[in-house]
Image (cartoon, helix red, strand yellow):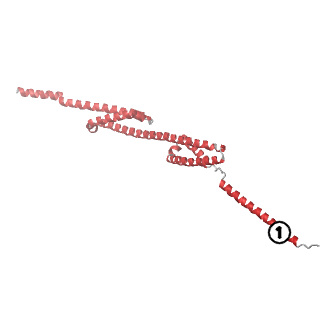
Amino acid sequence: MRKRTQILTFLGVLLLLGNPFRTAAQNSYADSIRMIKNELITYESRLKDIDQGLTTYMDCDLYSRNYRDCIAQMEAFYKENISLILLQNTALRDIWSRILDLREDIDEKMAVLKREKEAEEHKRELYQDLSETSLRYEQLNGSYQQLGQMKKKAAHDTLVSLKKRDSELYQEYFSKKTQNEDFIDQDPSLESLCNHIETLHKTISEAKDIETIKWGDVIFKVAIMAALLFFLINLIVSKKKLKNQLNGKKNKHIPSI
């Protein structure tokens, strides 16, 4: 009887105080939720800082390592606490959803900045190539300007060579220009280089050929003139001889008085 009374008393105390094991479990669960929430808020804050820092393509290199580390740590943490984040707490699920949106925005922004970086690098390479082409045209134009100081034969041969080099160089330039019209149209410095190149190309390609003495034609014409002159001389001599012969015959038939 006494033992039964003690048991009932113990149960009564439990009812008054509550179940200590249940209370401990509830406290542990609340602490876990609080810890997860704080950790997710930390990741969200790091991603916001990265997102705000990405303004130029150079920032990608500056933040890319920090971003990769943050993503790796965040994904590992998510796998460890996926049941609590997605299944048992709306607040955690909302934070995680915002984190995914931030990550998507950052990935898109980095992709855009990367394309801008590649475009900028391509423009620099294109500017260097066009500058080299412009320099080669300057050299051709320098040789072209000296044609007036040369003898006709040398000037003629030099111009033929210049036109050949111009044709080869312009084909290479025109192909590159056609492939990069969008870049050139949007960049005044590239457009200026192209205009300069095309001006020098037009100067050389449209230059009039320099006539030289063709000795074969000269010899042929001299031979024709000599033959014609020889023919005229023979004709005159023949006429003179014929005239003399006629005059001689007339003298023979004149009667004497």
Q: Residue at x 74, y 63 (%)?
A: 231
Look at the numbered disc 1 and give the secondary structure of its residue: helix
Tell me which corner region of the image, top left, top right, bottom left or bottom right, holds residue 191: top right
* Viewer-nearest residue: 4 or 102: 102
Q: Residue at x 78, y 66 (%)?
A: 238
Q: Residue at x 32, y 35 (%)?
A: 72
Q: Which residue is mark 1?
A: 245
Residue 3: percent from the left, percent from the top?
6, 27
Q: Single out the residue that lies furthest toward the front.
A: 256
Question: In the picture provided, is 146 more to the left or to the right than 94?
Answer: right
Residue 172: percent from the left, percent from the top?
52, 47
The quarter of the rendered structure image containing the C terminus is bottom right
From this viewpoint, is residue 175 visible?
yes
Question: In the picture provided, is 254 more to the left or to the right than 224?
Answer: right
Q: Single out the residue that lies furthest toward the left.
A: 1
Question: In the picture provided, is 8 more to the left or to the right than 83?
Answer: left
Tell me which corner region of the image, top left, top right, bottom left or bottom right, holds residue 117: top left
| Above or below for 209 versus 227 | above
Q: Residue at x 58, y 48 (%)?
A: 161
**Amino acid type of disc 1?**
Gln
From this viewpoint, is residue 81 visible?
no
Residue 96: percent from the left, percent from the top?
32, 37
Q: Residues within 10 Å of mark 1 (few under 14, many from 20)?
A: few
Q: Single out the residue that lies furthest toward the right.
A: 257
| Above or below for 105 versus 250 | above
Residue 178: percent from the left, percent from the top?
51, 48
* Viewer-nearest residue: 139 or 190: 139
